[in-house]
């Protein structure tokens, strides 16, 4: 590899690192445009192409004008057979494997155009929401017999993850070293009073808790993948692509023989979609700016679909406000057995060094958690059978390094875990009986959720253990 190309790759890797896949000044919505295209499947095929092109444009804007440098790392690596990029030589003659690849691409493209026609029709309709017929609403109402099928008071789990939220703010409020004007001691005013006999919170590193991530790089996608796989994967950055192991949501769907919409992921960041499924489409996944078009929908769904596309954040994702409202609405409409909600604003404000906005985002999360728990409390038998686990994908650096996370900031490995199970009688008492302080990792989340849902927890050499405070005693024996 030539030195100039090596440098180009380094720049391309470095540029989006702070915001997990976008670069400063990137037109918002660009990386998610496939969600808006009527030819959704075609967008999926094109996705690997336009991202490298966007990177190349960014490189051009940075004054890297030579043709070789225009050819960004991704473009060169993925499409060198088709875009030789003129590195001063004639492109090599295609090998037979390249020919086969080209043939496969052509077939995929044609298939995407023809097989995708029904999807196109659906998406075109979704782009211009129309009032739902009263009869349609009746048919999909939570009280209708169709809805009640398969949704009894079986155990359910909601996993909520907030991206890059430090334990320091969770337990000790705003950091006076970062913002000397603050004198608050508690941001999560709604969580702490609710730490009753059904809930626990651990991860105060000052008190000796040492809950950690389960990957060496302390980055987002590796963390989400390890949680969903139940083991550390080969993913080392936010560009590692789709997970290669059956994930927690996929196993829940398969073993409990649930319909697709009973196992759901609703996320602000589009790349969550490659962490939750190794086979696309087995479960319900709505990530980034995609509209919700499946499951039980109501007028709120359509309104949120419309609004989220008109109110974009300054980074490439959906605003948490819309992700959370969608998730809450989906929860009420569909009563999923497993729901993964992934929020992202916190990490984006932190990478930008905007501490007041990071803090106000955390306050917003506290309100959202309160709303989520109150909603479940109001959902009768379903709510009483639903456990909630809340955590983060990584911490952040200490003091002035708070904007960063990753291997240069080893302290970003510390995480916190909140859990609530209405069937518990006293997890605090149990915590005393267990060896404290707590030492849980991301790998402990999957077996815990599996146990809560009646599945045999995943077992392997380096798989995790149960978060015992969350499991009612009879389930442990
Ligand atoms: Zn993250």
Image (cartoon, rainbow, N blue to C red):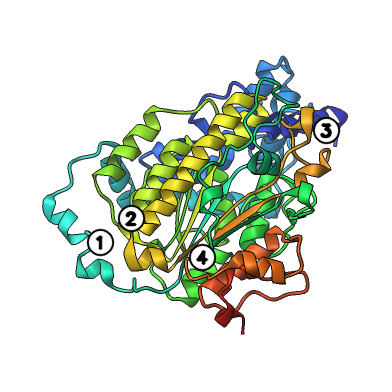
Quarter location, residue 186: top right
Q: Position of residue 369 (x, y in %)?
A: 48, 47
Question: Judging from the image, what secondary structure is the residue with disc 3 in?
Answer: helix
| Residue designated by label 1 | 142
Which marked residue is nearer to the observer: mark 1 or mark 4? 4
For image coordinates 78% across by 27% down, the residue present is 400
Residue on which the image places disc 4: 421
Image side of residue 422 versus residue 227, left or right = left
Instruction: State which image quarter holds ligand 1.
Output: top right
Q: Are marks 2 and 4 in contact (CB under 8 Å)?
A: no
- Residue 335, position in %: x, y? 36, 62
Above or below: residue 159 compared with residue 382 = above
Question: Is residue 22 in view?
Answer: no
The residue pinned by badge 2 equals 332
Which of pointers 3 and 4 lies earlier in the amino acid sequence?
A: 3
Mark 1 and mark 4: span between their CA atoms?
A: 24 Å
* Residue drawn at the location 67% of the way across and 65% of the way down: 444
Residue lying at 46% horizontally and 76% vertically, measured from the top left: 256
Towards the viewer: 439 or 270: 439
For disc 3, does the CB lie below 8 Å from ligand 1? no
Marks 3 and 4 in Cβ contact (< 8 Å): no
The answer to whether the residue labelled 1 contacts the one labelled 2, judged by CB atoms less than 8 Å apart, is yes
- SS category of the residue bearing label 2: helix
Q: Nearer the viewer, residue 30 or 267?
A: 267
Instruction: Identify the image quadrant of the N terminus.
Output: top right
Q: CA distance from mark 3 to mark 1?
A: 56 Å
Within 10 Å of disc 1 (Cα), the crowding (few <14, some 14-19, many 20+) is: some
Report which residue position mark 3 lands on: 6
Outermost bottom residue: 477
Counting residues from the start of the chain, the first of labels 2 and 4 encountered is: 2
Q: First in sequence, mark 3 or 1: give its number.
A: 3
Cβ of mark 4 under 8 Å from ligand 1: the answer is no
């Amino acid at each position: 590899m030539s030195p100039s190309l090596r440098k180009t790759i380094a720049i391309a890797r470095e540029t989006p690192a702070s915001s997990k896949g976008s670069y400063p000044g990137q037109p918002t919505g660009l990386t998610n445009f496939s969600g808006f295209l009527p030819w959704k499947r075609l967008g999926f095929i094109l996705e690997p192409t336009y991202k490298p092109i966007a990177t190349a444009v960014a490189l051009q804007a940075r004054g890297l004008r030579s043709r070789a440098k225009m050819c960004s790392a991704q473009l060169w690596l993925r499409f060198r057979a088709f875009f030789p990029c003129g590195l001063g030589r004639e492109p090599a003659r295609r090998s037979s494997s390249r020919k086969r690849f080209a043939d496969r691409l052509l077939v995929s493209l044609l298939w995407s155009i023809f097989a995708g026609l029904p999807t196109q029709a659906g998406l075109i309709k979704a782009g211009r929401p129309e009032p739902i017929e009263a009869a349609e609403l009746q048919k999909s109402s939570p009280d209708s017999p169709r809805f009640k099928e398969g949704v009894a008071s079986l155990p359910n789990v909601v996993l909520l993850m907030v991206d890059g939220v430090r334990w320091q703010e969770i337990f000790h409020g705003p950091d006076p070293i970062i913002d000397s004007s603050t004198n608050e001691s508690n941001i999560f005013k709604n969580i702490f009073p609710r730490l009753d006999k059904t809930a626990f919170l651990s991860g105060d590193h000052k008190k000796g808790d040492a809950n950690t991530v389960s990957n060496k790089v302390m980055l987002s996608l590796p963390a989400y993948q390890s949680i969903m796989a139940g083991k550390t994967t080969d993913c080392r950055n936010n560009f590692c692509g789709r997970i290669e192991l059956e994930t927690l949501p996929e196993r829940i769907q398969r073993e409990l023989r649930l319909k697709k919409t009973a196992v759901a992921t609703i996320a602000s960041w589009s790349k969550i979609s490659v962490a939750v499924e190794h086979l696309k489409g087995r479960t319900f996944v709505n990530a980034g700016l995609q509209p919700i078009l499946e499951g039980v929908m109501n007028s709120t769904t359509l309104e949120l679909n419309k609004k989220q596309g008109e109110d974009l954040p300054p980074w490439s994702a959906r605003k948490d406000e819309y992700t959370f409202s969608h998730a809450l609405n989906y929860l009420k409409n569909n009563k999923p057995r497993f729901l993964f909600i992934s929020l992202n604003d916190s990490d984006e404000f932190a990478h930008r060094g905007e501490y007041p906005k990071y803090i106000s985002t955390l306050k917003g999360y506290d309100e959202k958690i309160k709303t989520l728990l109150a909603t479940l409390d109001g959902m009768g038998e379903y709510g009483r059978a639903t456990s909630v686990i809340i955590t983060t994908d990584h911490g952040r650096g200490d003091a002035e390094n708070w904007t960063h996370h990753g291997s240069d900031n080893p302290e970003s490995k510390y995480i916190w875990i909140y859990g609530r199970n209405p069937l518990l009688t006293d997890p605090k008492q149990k915590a005393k009986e267990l060896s404290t302080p707590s030492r849980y990792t991301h790998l402990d989340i999957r077996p815990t959720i599996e146990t809560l849902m009646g599945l045999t927890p995943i077992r392997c050499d380096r798989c995790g253990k149960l978060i015992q405070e969350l499991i009612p005693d009879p389930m442990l024996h």
